[in-house]
Amino acid sequence: MKTIQIPYYTGHMQMHIAEENLKALITAKGDSYNSGKSEETLVREALENPIGTLPLYKLAEGKKKVTLVTSDHTRAVPSKLTLPILLGQIRKGNPEAEITILIATGLHRAPTETEMRNMFGDAIVDNEKISVNHAFEPEEFVYMGNLPSGAEFHVNRLAVECDLLVTEGFIEPHFFAGFSGGRKSILPGICNAATVNENHSYKAISSEKAKTGVLKQNPVHEDMLTAARRVNVQFILNVAQNSEKKIIAAFAGDLEKAHEKGVEFVRGLSQCASVRGDIVVTSNGGYPLDQNLYQTPKAVSTAEACAGEDGVIIMAASCVDGMGGEFFEKLIVMGTVEEIDDYLSSIPPKETISEQWCAQIYARILKKHKVILVTTYLDRKAVERANMIHASSLDEALEIAYSLKGKDAEVVVIPDGVSVLAVKTD
């Protein structure tokens, strides 16, 4: 019997599996990667040697109003470390600069003060000017024309009414934008609901190019990149992290060139050939990405690439914050997966409902695969209404899966499904 640790909330949950059932244990190579340098050294070296642009402090010279876009409480950006360094670089160029830290919430709820202190540290919360993107407040946004898809581009006015726009984030595989980081700080990060919705329309998400690891001809990515170019993002800092959320590489400089280098690095560590299993076990890598059901399709999409034709997927996610957004919750429990997909497919891009894309992706997966959700926070009835099977532990989930697939079923385990880019080879 083998014991495997699966990330869950702020710790791990154990799974016990017989050696003869375990077909593969898939992890990103990032966990074994060692740069030989501290996290702070990696960040400072990236800022000292920017890709495709002048150093940040040079760009800040003479700039009076600076907007610095960062991520919200649902993302593990190491802002406690990175923000003070970025602020120091800006003030090195102009000590008098008026800096606003803009939290890119997309359509998420605003972070609480406690969450902000956990993300940024007390010194930044107490001493810096912080603004939060509110996607449903029209007065916060400026119309900047249409995007390649035809979507109207409404962006937070703080990104337009500044002399220097800087963003920070991290890069990992993304289930329909190809990779996170770079341009995603703008769209969906600081756009209004209508822009985010249309960028994430049923039509866009249904594209064969809108999938993990694909950027070229990806309609979701193309809109995002156009949006970031249009507001003139002049400097980015993006990091790569291991499963412990530790920085293993940093990339700074030009919006596209620095992001491309980061993507190349992350792809090299995350991409692997998919291994077909009767049962696939995964997670969202624990907190903060496993705090609601809305975020879980990220890892379930990875498991989908390894699940046999009717393979069972086991997803471990705390869902400590419940289902997630109210729109997603209404959609994911509205009926059978066929009914959900039929309803969503009839919605024109400009009438896209906020958060429908995660319900769409779940409907696609649930048509082919039973999903067992391992959670100790979301109750059984809620899980079953979402067309999934509830389990309170990984061992319980595995027993349920064996009852569906047989005691000799082959099991593939991907402890952190968000960090892995599984590519089908057949």
Image (cartoon, rainbow, N blue to C red):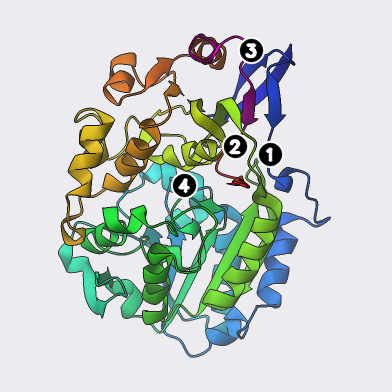
* 191 in relation to 334, above or below: below
Label 4 SS: helix
**Label located before the other in sequence (2 or 3):** 3
Residue at image position (38%, 59%) is 104
Work out how far the residue at label 2 is from the one at label 3, CA to CA, in angstroms.
24 Å
Q: Secondary structure at mark 3?
A: loop
Quickly name the residue at label 1.
27
On the image, the x and y values in percent for residue 324 come to: 32, 37
- Mark positioned earlier in the residue sequence (3 or 4): 4
The image quadrant that residue 203 belongs to is bottom left
The residue that mark 4 highlights is 117
Q: Which residue is mark 3?
A: 408
In the rendered image, is residue 158 in sight? yes
Q: Quadrant of residue 348?
A: bottom left
Which residue carries the number 2 mark? 416
x, y percent for residue 283: 54, 32
Q: Give the alpha-carbon distance from disc 1 to disc 4, as whole Å.
A: 31 Å
Distance from label 3 to label 4 (Cα)?
48 Å
**Residue 135 shown left or right of residue 99 in the figure:** left
Kind of residue sitting beneath label 3: Asp
Is residue 389 in the magenta section? no
- Please state the horizontal and vertical placement of residue 349, each as a whole percent of the image: 21, 59
The amino acid sitting under disc 1 is Thr
Where is residue 413 shown, x and y percent of the image? 63, 29
Between the residue at mark 1 and the residue at mark 2, the CA separation in whole angstroms equals 7 Å
